[in-house]
C-alpha cells in the first residue's frame, strides 16, 4: 500500500517527566519570590513605628534556592523565611519591653493569603515555559 | 435554646457566638483526672483575639480565621489559633499542661447544637526563647486547630436572601 502522507508519533514521556521534575523547583522558586516580595513590601511600613524594622530584617527574608526544594509524600515544597527571631515575636504577639504593651503585627500570614493567586500564576507560568523549552509545544 | 433545665446559647448563630462557644468548650474541658482550666490557671483567663496590656499569667488567647471552603460558601475551613502564654519562665511546665487541656478540648471537638463545628487535627509548637523587644521572661505554646464549620449565621443569611 502506498501513502501520500505520513504521521510520525514520538513518545515524549521521558523527556516530559524529566522536564516536569526539573521545572517544579524553578516554578516553586518563582512562587516563593512573589511571596517574599510581598513580605518585604509590608515590612517597609515597619511594626507600629519604623524604628522596629531595619534594613537587616527586610534583607533577611529569603527563599530557598531551587536546588534546595524538598520533596515528600505530598509533593514538593520550598521554604520562605527569616533568621531574625523578633519577626516571629511580632507575628505571634509579644509583651514589648519598650512600649510596655502587648504588640502584634501580622505580616507573614496575611501576605501568604494575599499572594496565593499570584503564586499559583507564577508557578504555572514558569513551569509551562520550562517544559516548552525542553519538550516543545504540541 | 433549652436543653433540659439548662439554657444554652446558640452556638454558631453569629461570629461572636462562635467565639463564645469555643471559649465555653475550653472552660468546660476536663483532664482525665477531672481538672479544669480554672484549676490550672486559677481563673478563666481566656481572651479573644487580643490581650490586656497588663495581664495575669498564664493566659490563653483564641483567634479564629475562617475561609469559605465549599457548598457555595456555606461550609468553611477555620484555623483556630490558641496561644498559651506564661510568665516567668518557670511557668513553662504549667503552660504545657494547659496546652494539653486545650488539645483535649479541641482536637476531637464536635459541636452540633446549632450549625456544626468540628476539629480533628492541629499543629502545636513550643515557642523559642523570647528576646528583645519581647519580654524575655515569657514562655508560650502556640497550637492551630483545623476546624470545619457549617455556621448557622450563613444559613440565616441565605434564608433572608431567599425572602427578599
Image (spheres, rainbow, N blue to C red):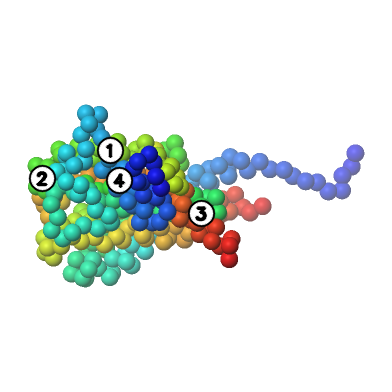
Query: Which residue occupies 30% across, 45% down?
Result: B24
Q: Secondary structure at mark 4?
A: helix
Which is nearer the eye, A132 or B81?
B81
Can residue B116 be seen here? yes
Q: Please give the label number shown on residue B89.
A: 2
Q: Position of residue B4 (x, y in %)?
A: 38, 39
Q: Earlier in the sequence, mark 2 or mark 1?
A: 1
User: Which quadrant: the N terminus of chain A?
Assistant: top right
Distance from the alpha carbon under mark 3 to that under mark 2: 46 Å
Distance from the alpha carbon under mark 4 to that under mark 3: 23 Å
Q: What chain does mark 2 sit on? A: B
Q: Position of residue A123 (x, y in %)?
A: 48, 55
Q: Earlier in the sequence, mark 2 or mark 4?
A: 4
Distance from the alpha carbon under mark 2 to that under mark 1: 25 Å
Q: What chain does mark 4 sit on? A: B
Q: Earlier in the sequence, mark 1 or mark 4?
A: 4
Q: Position of residue B32 (x, y in %)?
A: 25, 29
Reading the image, the residue beneath label 1 is B29
Q: Please give the label number shown on residue B24.
A: 4
Where B69 falls versus A71 (above or below)? Answer: below
Disc 2 vs disc 1: which is toward the camera?
A: 1
The residue carrying pointer 2 sits among few (fewer than 14), some (14 to 19) or many (20 or more) residues within 10 Å by Cα, namely some
Q: Secondary structure at mark 2?
A: helix
Reading the image, the residue beneath label 3 is B155
Looking at the image, the residue that sits furthest to the top is B33
User: In this rendering, do the residues under marks 4 and 3 share a single chain?
Assistant: yes
The residue carrying pointer 4 sits among few (fewer than 14), some (14 to 19) or many (20 or more) residues within 10 Å by Cα, namely some
User: In this rendering, do the residues under marks 2 and 1 share a single chain?
Assistant: yes
Amino acid at each position: 500500500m502506498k501513502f501520500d502522507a505520513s504521521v510520525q508519533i514520538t513518545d515524549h514521556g521521558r523527556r516530559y517527566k524529566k522536564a516536569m521534575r526539573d521545572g517544579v523547583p524553578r516554578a516553586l522558586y518563582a512562587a516563593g519570590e512573589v511571596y517574599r516580595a510581598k513580605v518585604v513590601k509590608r515590612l517597609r511600613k515597619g511594626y507600629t513605628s519604623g524604628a522596629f524594622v531595619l534594613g537587616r530584617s527586610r534583607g533577611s527574608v529569603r527563599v530557598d534556592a531551587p536546588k534546595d526544594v524538598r520533596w515528600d509524600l505530598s509533593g514538593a515544597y520550598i521554604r520562605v523565611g527569616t533568621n531574625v527571631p523578633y519577626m516571629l515575636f511580632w507575628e505571634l504577639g509579644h509583651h514589648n519591653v519598650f512600649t510596655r504593651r502587648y504588640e502584634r503585627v501580622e505580616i507573614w500570614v496575611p501576605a501568604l493569603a494575599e499572594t496565593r493567586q499570584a503564586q499559583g500564576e507564577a508557578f504555572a507560568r514558569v513551569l509551562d515555559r520550562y517544559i516548552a523549552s525542553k519538550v516543545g509545544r504540541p | 435554646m433549652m436543653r433540659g433545665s439548662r439554657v444554652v446559647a446558640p452556638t454558631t448563630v453569629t461570629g461572636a457566638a462562635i467565639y463564645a462557644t469555643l471559649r465555653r468548650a475550653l472552660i468546660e474541658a476536663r483532664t482525665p483526672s477531672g481538672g479544669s482550666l480554672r484549676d490550672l490557671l486559677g481563673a478563666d483567663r481566656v481572651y479573644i483575639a487580643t490581650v490586656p496590656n497588663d495581664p495575669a499569667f498564664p493566659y490563653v488567647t483564641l483567634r479564629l480565621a475562617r475561609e469559605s471552603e465549599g457548598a457555595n460558601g456555606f461550609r468553611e475551613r477555620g484555623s483556630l489559633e490558641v496561644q498559651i502564654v506564661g510568665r516567668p519562665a518557670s511557668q513553662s511546665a504549667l503552660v504545657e499542661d494547659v496546652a494539653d487541656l486545650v488539645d483535649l478540648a479541641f482536637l476531637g471537638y464536635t459541636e452540633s447544637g446549632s450549625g456544626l463545628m468540628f476539629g480533628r487535627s492541629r499543629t502545636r509548637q513550643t515557642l523559642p526563647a523570647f528576646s528583645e523587644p519581647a519580654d524575655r521572661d515569657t514562655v508560650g505554646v502556640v497550637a492551630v486547630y483545623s476546624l470545619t464549620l457549617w455556621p448557622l449565621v450563613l444559613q440565616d443569611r441565605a434564608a433572608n436572601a431567599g425572602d427578599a
